[in-house]
């Protein structure tokens, strides 16, 4: 696997290069965003590990740029910023995971495995006239493209991958928010409401359904 490490602290960059190299991966180091962009232009990578605080900007801007361009290369933010707000910003900005420094190498390997496992899925998901282009992170209802935030996309994708199954709030928190505790007041309910306003409003039939006290299910009840 080819990994791009965007990190300006030499000790951390060296630690990652040695550790990932020992695991059999090919690692390229970029200490600045400009160097990372050049590397991504010249080469393809299977994974990006990117620091938030770099000499020439915020590493999250690199991920945002990739997502806007339709590049779904898995990316993990590595940062000393440990506030919940920072993590939410990172995930909403398109990062697949967010790991706070200092971290153990074993935890990093586990996060990488989880991110890559999530990325190995069907290139296209469908339910009714809803279509999800997974690699490009684009959503269509019929011929209409629907713009979703990173969190909304991850939530919809998880539900559509399990279409017809009722998914509890707890399971959604664990899968989409990576926590068993609600990070905000009624977060799941709020984001389900966001999804409905975008993929169901003005379309027929509605695809997102609530089973009160049980959870949520995506299905085309006309079929």
Image: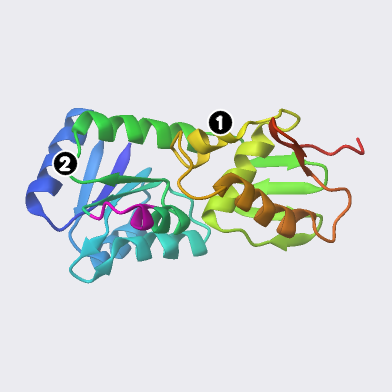
Image position, residue 4 (x, y; %): 28, 49
Say if residue 187 shows up in the picture.
yes
Report the span colored magenta: 81-87
Which is more toward the observer, 106 or 132?
A: 106
* Corner quadrant of residue 221: top right
Examine the rendered structure and indicate whether residue 114 appears above or below residue 141: above
Say if residue 134 shows up in the picture.
no
Image position, residue 215 (x, y; %): 68, 34
Give the structural element (helix, strand or loop) at label 2: helix
Give the structural element (helix, strand or loop) at label 1: helix
Would residue 13 appear left or right of 169 to someone viewing this image?
A: left
Which is more toward the observer, 221 or 72?
A: 221
Extreme-bottom residue of the structure: 56
The residue under label 2 is 17
Callout in the foreground (1, 2): 1
The residue under label 1 is 171
Residue 82 is covered by the magenta coloring = yes
Residue 13 is covered by the magenta coloring = no
Examine the rendered structure and indicate whether residue 211 appears above or below residue 31: above
Query: Which image quadrant: the N terminus?
Result: top left
Examine the rendered structure and indicate whether residue 76 appears above or below residue 174: below
Image position, residue 61 (x, y; %): 36, 66
Residue drawn at x 17%, y 60% as measured from the top left? 31
Which is more toward the observer, 49 or 183?
A: 183
Residue drawn at x 43%, y 37% as measured from the top left? 179
């Amino acid at each position: 696997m080819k990994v791009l490490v965007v990190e300006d602290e030499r000790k951390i960059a060296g630690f990652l290069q040695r550790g990932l190299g020992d695991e059999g991966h090919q690692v390229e180091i970029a200490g600045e965003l400009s160097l990372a962009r050049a590397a991504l232009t010249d080469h393809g990578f299977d994974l990006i590990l990117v620091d938030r605080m770099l000499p020439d900007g915020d590493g999250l801007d690199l991920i945002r740029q990739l997502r806007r361009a339709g590049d779904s290369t898995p990316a993990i933010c590595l940062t000393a910023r440990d506030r919940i707000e920072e993590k939410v910003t990172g995930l909403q900005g398109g990062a697949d995971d967010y790991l706070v420094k200092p971290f153990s190498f074993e935890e990093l390997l586990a996060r990488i495995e989880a991110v890559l496992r999530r990325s190995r899925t069907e290139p296209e998901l469908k339910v009714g006239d809803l279509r999800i282009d997974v690699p490009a992170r684009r959503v269509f209802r019929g011929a209409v493209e629907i713009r979703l935030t990173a969190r909304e996309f991850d939530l919809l994708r998880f539900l559509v991958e399990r279409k017809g199954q009722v998914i509890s709030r707890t399971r959604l928190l664990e899968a989409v928010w990576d926590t068993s505790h609600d990070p905000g007041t009624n977060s799941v309910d709020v984001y389900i409401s966001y999804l409905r306003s975008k993929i169901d409003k003005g379309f027929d039939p509605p695809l997102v359904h609530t089973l009160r006290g049980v959870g949520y299910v995506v299905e085309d009840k006309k079929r």
